[in-house]
Image (cartoon, rainbow, N blue to C red):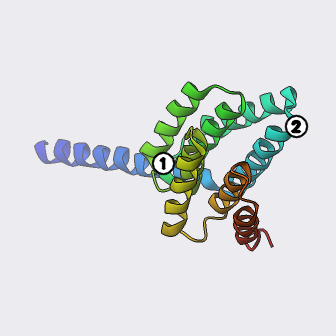
Amino acid sequence: MKKFLCLMLIASILFVSCSTMQKDSIYSTASSQDNIRNIENIEVNIVRQYRENNQEKILQIRQDLNTLLSVPSSDSSYLALVYALYSDYFLLVRDRSSAKRMLKRAENYNPHEEYVYLVKARLTEKLEDKRDYLISMIKLNPRAYRLQSELGFVYYLLEDYTRALVAFDASLDFFA
């Protein structure tokens, strides 16, 4: 009888742990192709709204981000990207304190995500500091096209048009 109870206890523990593993597998599929497309669309929409400032579309960005975060995930890179996008959304609506809070969450998931670096640069006040930070991050990852493009914009703001053109040109290879 004791052996039977021990066997049942072990079987139930295994059953519970296996079902937990299955949930983890489901959660980690949050970076499926649909979500990747949604993330890309959100990123494009954020960039557009920096220019257009359409309040309906800005509200839609927030709803889309909330939808992505409503699906549980154990993929830390995916979560870092979504929270970094949310941080950029808060910069778009000029809420720097919320942007910093979301950036901190993104960094907790993956501090090496390119979009985390991008938002960190956008949160940097002085253009020279922003330029230096972007240059140092690009040295670590020369294929970081978002950072290249942002560096071009910073050079443009600094009225260093030749370097701006070079930086923008370096980012174009990744859009082709």
Q: Amino acid at mark 1?
A: Ser
Q: Which residue is mark 2?
A: 52
Q: Residue 151, relative to residue 53: is it above or below?
A: below
Q: Residue 147, relative to residue 63: is it above or below?
A: below
Among numbered discs 1 and 2, the one appearing first in the sequence = 2
The picture places residue 131, in percent across and down from the top left corner, at 58, 54
How far apart are labels 1 and 2 at the CA level?
Answer: 34 Å
Give me the residue at 84% from left, 26% from top: 55
The picture places residue 62, in percent across and down from the top left corner, at 72, 31
Mark carried by residue 137: none
Horizontal side of 132 relative to 8 (left or right) equals right
Q: Name the one closer to the observer, 144 or 60.
A: 144
Q: Residue 100, relative to residue 128: is it above or below?
A: above
**Element type where label 2 sits in the image:** helix
The picture places residue 165, in percent across and down from the top left corner, at 76, 66
Horizontal side of 150 relative to 97 (left or right) equals right
Q: Name the one closer to the observer, 119 or 169.
A: 169
- Judged by depth in the image, the label closer to the viewer, 1 or 2, is 2
Give me the residue at 54% from left, 61% from top: 135
Horizontal side of 101 relative to 63 (left or right) equals left
Q: Amino acid at mark 2?
A: Glu
| Residue 78 visible to the viewer | no
Task: Determine which quarter of the picture holds residue 98.
Answer: top right
Neighbourhood count class around disc 2 (C-alpha, 10 Å): few under 14, some 14–19, many 20 upward: few
Q: Which quarter shows the N terminus?
A: top left
Q: Which residue is mark 1?
A: 74
